[in-house]
Each structure stands twice: as structure tokens, then as C-alpha cells.
Image: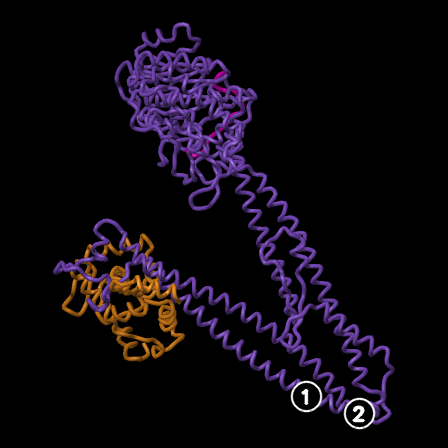
């Protein structure tokens, strides 16, 4: 909630102290002063004091008239006095009744980006022993950092500014400058748009929708944020998954094994994860590792049950086996060298593909540059990239090849598409090369393992052949040891594999939770409560329009878009078909309607509406009377409405008959000499 | 097969084929070439240089590889022999177009200089960051590559 209690302008001039004080206490305040008397300056001063000048224009200039920046004119003598120093101060109050005084210099030695906040009602009750702190505005972080004034202001008003997406993909808070136009209608630009003249220079996506959603505290706003957050968590879960899967693949590959049926993308099915298993290669075929473990265990058992034979008994068999083994090792080595050659070839292929991709990317960049040059606009593109000969005006090819070499040159756009397609193909080729090399590496490791074990066996057999005849068979012992070690090694790998699979299973559980969370998000963008608020807004606008004498079409035909939150008629946005007076009436009704909704519904509306010169000239007198009575009705629900007008005073007084309100009347210039009292 | 024959019997009209427009490398695009030419001139002393130097720099600033090589030669980590220098026909065509469009002035048939229009074009190219890598290279290398250096490298002499 936000209430304006007091606005003070002060300018120290060569002709003494000038300034004005506007104290607001009523629920509905009508500020009356003639044209060019400084009403807008006072209201702009309020915005300036709160560091909201970027709401009026993206330029970082002081939005105040010369009377606060350069000189003031003495109303009695007409003499101009130069301004030496000036400042504005406002006293504001929030929902908890806390009052603070905010002061910002206009012309002064100090930094204009500083705003000092006094935590007490200094303007209405005079100076006291209050804490004072300086904040900054207009700098990066003004809304996010604790020392930023807008961070303080949002806190003071009880707003938690949501984080929204920018056009460049980054995040930023929904700046307060984008929210104030929804209830502070400023004279120069404020009357032009519904829902409001919201600044777009912050490059926030769909800023009009986001600001209305926040002000009305729509659940969809939270929903959108939750959706964004969920997307983020899901993508990090995907990355984690890929990391785990890669870890498993590396583990398998280094042991010459292959991880089969491993789910590459996250899955919720535990069974899918459990289906993954290790495989080993035997005679060019990949078989389950369990088979190998069983076979090895069986062999080991047989050997363990036998007593160690003497060399004499095994020599004959050893000779034949050694011969067969030598032949096998030879075949394996030939196979390995073929694999190795294939791998080398693939590496060369990969390098050349990478080079090709790099070349394509370079060419793509050049074509994109050429396109940019052609679209330069102005006459420059015609000079840089003429499509007619600059001398003889004949049509020319858009290339630097000799004219007529090509029948027709591809357009730059097509050329870019053509290159992009090629790049995609080559990137796929590169991916395939990586997979191929990995596969071949695996084969090299697993066949290497085989050669090593066969060579060890061969060595043992050979030593048997030359050993004394009563010695124990070394080949037999070696085989037993080898089998034992192999079993330990495989068992160890399998154990680690299962451990990692368990971790993956846990991730599958987390993924299931994420999917469940996504499924819980409702399909419809707006919740029931949101729709309720929108129809409340509709009802309020319609009933107001009837009182304002809206005439373009029956007020009951008006609806508020569920999508853009703008007024619609029969599903079409209302635009030029409205008469000038009716579009002013609609603007009044919409802005007051937003406030009206906040009575009885939970919203973030600060309960404050300011209208600067509500274009009464364009509407009929009856409408102005209607506006004031509606404003008084809506304000009576604990809200503050400030309407500044220069309408004929007697008429205003007439309109206000029987309406409870505070009428502030200024006869001449609002910024006038101030006798040396203590309020300076 | 029967179905194929049936379809074929329906196709009695004459075929005509239109040749697809041919893709060309981005550096042979008119706008790209003329822009590079302007950047070469802008990088030289007095915003003018000889045709020989234009050919030399235009060719070397065209690819990432040749840019790297030229930098290494200037830093004397490589000899001038390693540098491929060429007289590029497209540079002549780009020069002709640029001269006709009033972006450059021809000085005595041997050198080119940027016109005021050309200077404006260069400013726009730099501001929009088009041909960014090329512009960066020319900014670094342009002032070091005097006419004399070009002459010597072309003759494969040390400089």
C-alpha cells in the first residue's frame, strides 16, 4: 500500500525562498489550479522524488519544469530570480502506518542519484529524531541491491518484485517504473494507452502483461515463474544424467567392456535403468558379462579340484596347445592392426570434417555479413551492394565473378540456408566419427586384453616344455592364477557398475518427481481466482462506463481480454473505433477498475490512483461529475485518489456537491515565495 | 511394376527443368568485397594505398588462416616465403564498382583513396560490426604493412 501524505517543493533563489506544499489527507483529493500554474510540476516532482523519471522517458533527465531548474518569476513583480539550489520531498505512508520522508535534490552540488530517506513524518509533523539513510537510483542494481532506492520502495510498499525474462534471455526484476503507470496517469504520455504507458526501454518480455499480472496478483504470474524454474531444474537434471551415463561408459570402456541398454536420456522407469548391463566380446560377438563370470568360475573350479600335474604328463598336450595359441595370437594381432588402421583413417576423417565445418562457418559468417550490408538501409546499401551497374545502369549479378559466369546467383538468404544445411550434415558426420572412434577404441582394449592373457598362457606352456620332467606344470598354476585374477577384476568392475547404476536409479526417481511436478501445473493459464478478478474488473468498468455516458457501444458488450488484459468488444481489441471522449472514459474506468478489484480481493495494488488533468475537455460535463462520484465511491474503501484539474472552479464545486472529498485550490502559480518560516 | 507403368503412361507432357541458382562463397558477394576493399583503404596511411597493397591485404585478410599467417610474418616468427600472395581478380572488380559508386577515387591509375562517402561507409561498417574479424585484423596490421613491406614480401625478401 502507498499513500501520499505531503509533497514539498523548495527552490532557493537569488530572490529568496520559493516553493509549495501540498498536504493530502482525504481519501479523494481534487487539486484545483489554473493552467500552467505548476500542477504537473508538483505531480512530476512526486515521481522524481521516488526516482521514477524513467517512467516518463528513457532519457535520464529531470522531468521538472524550468521553475525548479532555472528561474522562478515573482508573481507580484514579474521579476525573474535564478535558482541556486532546489529539492523535492515527499512523505509517504504504507499499510502498516509507517511514514517516511523521501528527499531528492534537483539543483545542488551533490549527486542527483542519491535519495535520502528519513524514517519519520518530517513534513507533516516537523523535524524529529529520525534515522536517515541515503539510497541511490538510476544505477544498475537500483531495484535489486539493498542500497538501491527502488529496492527500499518495493519493500516499503510490501511488494516482492518478481524476476522476469528480458528479450536478450537474461533475467531482471519487474522494475517499479513498469508498475506505476498502472495507477499514476501522468498528463503528457499517461492518457494514451490502456493498461498504461509502460516504459519498454527495460526490454522486458511482454511487459504489459507481466505488470498487470503482478498488480492484480494473478496466480498465473506465480505459475509462469514456477514453470520457468521447473524448466531450469529439468535441464540441470538432464545434464546430470548425461554426466552419469558418460561416467558409466568410461568405466566399461577402460575394462574392455560395453555398457548395453543404458538409457541415454532421463527416464522414470527404474526397470529401464536396471535393464542396463555390461557385455564382453567373444569371437566378435557381444555377450552378457554374467555368462563370462559363470564360465570363468566353472573353469576355475575344475582346475581347483585337480591336483597340480607334473610336466612329464602334460608336455605333449602343451606342445599342441602352444602351437594353436601362437596361431590365435597371430590372427588376433592382424585383426588388431586392421582395427588400428581403421581408427587412424577415422581420425583423419574426423579432422577433415572438423576443418570443413570451420570453413563452412567462416563462409556462413561472410554471407551473414553480406546480408547485413545489403540491409543497411539508407543509400549506403545501394552504394556498397548495387544491383545495377552504377555507370551504365544495366542489371548485374550480385557477385564479384566476371559478369555472366553463372546463369543465376543464389540469393544471400538461400545461400545462408544452403550453408546451414551443409554445416548440419557435416556436424552429424563429425558426431558419427566420434562414436566410431569410441567403438574402435573399445575393440582395441578388449582384443588387447585377450592377446595379453593368451601370451601369458603361451609363456607358461613354453616354460613347461623346457622344464625338468618331474617339475610341477607352470602352465597349470598360471592358468589357475589367471582365472582367479580375471574373476576379481571383472567382479570389481561389475560392482562399481552396479553402484553407479544405483545412483542413476536415484536420479530416475528425482526425474519422476520433476515430471510429476510438471503434470501438476494446470493446463489453463489463468486460475479460477484470476478469472474471478478479471470479471470483477469487467463489471466495474461496465458500471463506470454507464455513469460516464460511454456511447460508442453498449457497455455490457465490453469484455477484458483473458490474454492481454486489454478491453475488448466481441473478442477484438478496442482501438480507433472509439470516439476521443469515449477512449478517455474507458481509460478512467480501466484505471479505477483496477483499484476497485483490489477491494475484497488480494492484489498488489497500492490503493492509490493519480489522474493528472483527466482530459475533461474531451469528455462531457456529465462524465466529469460521474468520474468524481465514482472516484469518491471507490476511494471510500480505504484508498487514495488524487485528481488534478484546471476545470472551471465553480463547475468543480458543483460536481463535488454531496461528495466527500478534500478540495485544494491554488489561485495562481503553485510555486510562490515563502516567508522565512521553519519549514524550509 | 504395373503401378509404375500406369503412372508413367499418365505422364505424357514434356519435362522442363530449371537450373537451380548457384551458391557462391560469401567473400564473392558484391557488398562483402566492396566493404573489405574500403576497410583495407581505411587501415592505410592517409586512407589511400597502391593497387598492389590492396591486392596483398585483401587476399590475406580473407580467411582466418591467412590472417594468422600474416600476423606471424609481421611478428617475424615466419618468413615471407610462407605467405601466399595473390593478385585477386575480384579485387579489381570490387575496385571498379567502388569507384563507379563514388566510394573511392582512383589516383593516377595506380592507387585508390577513400572518398568522403567511402569514409561514411567505413564508419557505418565498423559501427555495425560487420566483417568484424577482418576489420580487427586490418586495424592491427594496416599501419605495419607499409608499401615498402608489401614490395619486399612480394619479392620474398626479408623486410
Element marked by disc 1: helix
How many badges with numbers are in the image?
2
Disc sitting over residue A326 in the figure = 1
**Chain A color in figure:** purple
Name the quadrant of the N terminus of chain B.
bottom left
Question: Which residue is farthest left?
Answer: A392
Asked if A500 appears above or below A55 in the picture, the reply is below
Residue B40 seen in render = no
Q: Residue A545 in the image: x percent, y percent? A: 38, 18
**Chain B color in figure:** orange
- Magenta range: A110-125
Name the quadrant of the C terminus of chain B.
bottom left
Disc sitting over residue A315 in the figure = 2
Asked if A309 appears above or below A66 in the picture, the reply is below
Subunit that carries the residue with mark 2: A
Camera-side residue of A225 and B62: A225
The CA distance from mark 2 to mark 1 is: 16 Å
Q: Is residue A676 left or right of residue A470?
A: left
Camera-side residue of A375 and A418: A418
Q: Is residue A394 left or right of residue A227?
A: left
Residue B72 seen in render = yes
Q: Residue A539 in the image: x percent, y percent? A: 44, 20
* Residue at 28 percent of width and 55 percent of height: A373
On whether residue A119 falls in the magenta region, the answer is: yes
Q: Residue A619 in the image: x percent, y percent? A: 30, 17
Amino acid at each position: 500500500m502507498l499513500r501520499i501524505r505531503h509533497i514539498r517543493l523548495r527552490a532557493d533563489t537569488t530572490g529568496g525562498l520559493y516553493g509549495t506544499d501540498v498536504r493530502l489527507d482525504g481519501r479523494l483529493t481534487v487539486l484545483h489550479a489554473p493552467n500552467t500554474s505548476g500542477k504537473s510540476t508538483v505531480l512530476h516532482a512526486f515521481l522524481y522524488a521516488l526516482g521514477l523519471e524513467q517512467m516518463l522517458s528513457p532519457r535520464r533527465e529531470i522531468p521538472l519544469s524550468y521553475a525548479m531548474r532555472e528561474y522562478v518569476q515573482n508573481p507580484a513583480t514579474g521579476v525573474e530570480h535564478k535558482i541556486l539550489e532546489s529539492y523535492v520531498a515527499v512523505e509517504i505512508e504504507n499499510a502498516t502506518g509507517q511514514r517516511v520522508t523521501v528527499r531528492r535534490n534537483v539543483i545542488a552540488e551533490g549527486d542527483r542519484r542519491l535519495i535520502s530517506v528519513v524514517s519519520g513524518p518530517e513534513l507533516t509533523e516537523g523535524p524529529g529524531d529520525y534515522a536517515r539513510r541515503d539510497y541511490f537510483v538510476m544505477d544498475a542494481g537500483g531495484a535489486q541491491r539493498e542500497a538501491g532506492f527502488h529496492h527500499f520502495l518495493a519493500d516499503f510498499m510490501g511488494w516482492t518484485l518478481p524476476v522476469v525474462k528480458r528479450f536478450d534471455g537474461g533475467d531482471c526484476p519487474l522494475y517499479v517504473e513498469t508498475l506505476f503507470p498502472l495507477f499514476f496517469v501522468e498528463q503528457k504520455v499517461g492518457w494514451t494507452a490502456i493498461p498504461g504507458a509502460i516504459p519498454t526501454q527495460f526490454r522486458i518480455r511482454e511487459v504489459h502483461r507481466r505488470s498487470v499480472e503482478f498488480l492484480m496478483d494473478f496466480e498465473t504470474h506465480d505459475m509462469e515463474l514456477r514453470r520457468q524454474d521447473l524448466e531450469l531444474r529439468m535441464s540441470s537434471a538432464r545434464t546430470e544424467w548425461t554426466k552419469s551415463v558418460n561416467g558409466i561408459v568410461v568405466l566399461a570402456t577402460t575394462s574392455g567392456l560395453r555398457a548395453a541398454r543404458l538409457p541415454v536420456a532421463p527416464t522414470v522407469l527404474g526397470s529401464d535403468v536396471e535393464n542396463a548391463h555390461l557385455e564382453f566380446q567373444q569371437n566378435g560377438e557381444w555377450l552378457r558379462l554374467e555368462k563370462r563370470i559363470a564360465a570363468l568360475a566353472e573353469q576355475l573350479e575344475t582346475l581347483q579340484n585337480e591336483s597340480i600335474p607334473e610336466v612329464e604328463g602334460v608336455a605333449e598336450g602343451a606342445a599342441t596347445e602352444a602351437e594353436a595359441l601362437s596361431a590365435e595370437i597371430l590372427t588376433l594381432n592382424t585383426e588388431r592392426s586392421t582395427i588400428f588402421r581403421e581408427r587412424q583413417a577415422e581420425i583423419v576423417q574426423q579432422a577433415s570434417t572438423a576443418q570443413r565445418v570451420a570453413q563452412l562457418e567462416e563462409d556462413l559468417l561472410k554471407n551473414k555479413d553480406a546480408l547485413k550490408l545489403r540491409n543497411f538501409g539508407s543509400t549506403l546499401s545501394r552504394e556498397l551492394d548495387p544491383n545495377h551497374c552504377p555507370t551504365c545502369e544495366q542489371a548485374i549479378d550480385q557477385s564479384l565473378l566476371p559478369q555472366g559466369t553463372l546463369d543465376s546467383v543464389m540469393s544471400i538468404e538461400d545461400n545462408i540456408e544452403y550453408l546451414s544445411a551443409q554445416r548440419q550434415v557435416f556436424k552429424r558426420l563429425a558426431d558419427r566419427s566420434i562414436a566410431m572412434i569410441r567403438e574402435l577404441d573399445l575393440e582395441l582394449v578388449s582384443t588387447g586384453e585377450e592377446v595379453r592373457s593368451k601370451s601369458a598362457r603361451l609363456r607358461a606352456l613354453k616354460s613347461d616344455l623346457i622344464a625338468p620332467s618331474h617339475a610341477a606344470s607352470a602352465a597349470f598354476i598360471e592358468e589357475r592364477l589367471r582365472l582367479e585374477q580375471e574373476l576379481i577384476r571383472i567382479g570389481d568392475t561389475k560392482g562399481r557398475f552396479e553402484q553407479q547404476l544405483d545412483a542413476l536409479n536415484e536420479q530416475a526417481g528425482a526425474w519422476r518427481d520433476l515430471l510429476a511436478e510438471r503434470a501438476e501445473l494446470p493446463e489453463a493459464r489463468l486460475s479460477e481466482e484470476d478469472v474471478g478478478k478479471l470479471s470483477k474488473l469487467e463489471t466495474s468498468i461496465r458500471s463506470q462506463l454507464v455513469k460516464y455516458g460511454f456511447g460508442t457501444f453498449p457497455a455490457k458488450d465490453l469484455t477484458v481480454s483473458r490474454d492481454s488484459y486489454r478491453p475488448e468488444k466481441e473478442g477484438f481489441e478496442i482501438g480507433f473505433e472509439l470516439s476521443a471522449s469515449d477512449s478517455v472514459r474507458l481509460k478512467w474506468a480501466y484505471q479505477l477498475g483496477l483499484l476497485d478489484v483490489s477491494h475484497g480481493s488480494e492484489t498488489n495494488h497500492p490503493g492509490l490512483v493519480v489522474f493528472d488533468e483527466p482530459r475533461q475537455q474531451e469528455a462531457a460535463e456529465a462524465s466529469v461529475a460521474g468520474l468524481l462520484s465514482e472516484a469518491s465511491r471507490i476511494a471510500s474503501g480505504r484508498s487514495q485518489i488524487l485528481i488534478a484539474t484546471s476545470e472551471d472552479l465553480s463547475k468543480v464545486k458543483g460536481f463535488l456537491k454531496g461528495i466527500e472529498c478534500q478540495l485544494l485550490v491554488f489561485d495562481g502559480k503553485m510555486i510562490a515565495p515563502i516567508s522565512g518560516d521553519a519549514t524550509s | 511394376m504395373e503401378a509404375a507403368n500406369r503412372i508413367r503412361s499418365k505422364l505424357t507432357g514434356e519435362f522442363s527443368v530449371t537450373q537451380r541458382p548457384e551458391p557462391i562463397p560469401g567473400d564473392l558477394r558484391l557488398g562483402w568485397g566492396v566493404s573489405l576493399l574500403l576497410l583495407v583503404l581505411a587501415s592505410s596511411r592517409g586512407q589511400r594505398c597502391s593497387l598492389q597493397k590492396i591486392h596483398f591485404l585483401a587476399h590475406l585478410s580473407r580467411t582466418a588462416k591467412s590472417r594468422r599467417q600474416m600476423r606471424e610474418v609481421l611478428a617475424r616468427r615466419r618468413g615471407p616465403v610462407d605467405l601466399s600472395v595473390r593478385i585477386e581478380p575480384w579485387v579489381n572488380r570490387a575496385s571498379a564498382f567502388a569507384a563507379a559508386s563514388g566510394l573511392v577515387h582512383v589516383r593516377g591509375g595506380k592507387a585508390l583513396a577513400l572518398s568522403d562517402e567511402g569514409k561514411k561507409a567505413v564508419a557505418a561498417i565498423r559501427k555495425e560490426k560487420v566483417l568484424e574479424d577482418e576489420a580487427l585484423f586490418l586495424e592491427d596490421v594496416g599501419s605495419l604493412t607499409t608499401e615498402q613491406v608489401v614490395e619486399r614480401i612480394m619479392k620474398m625478401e626479408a623486410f
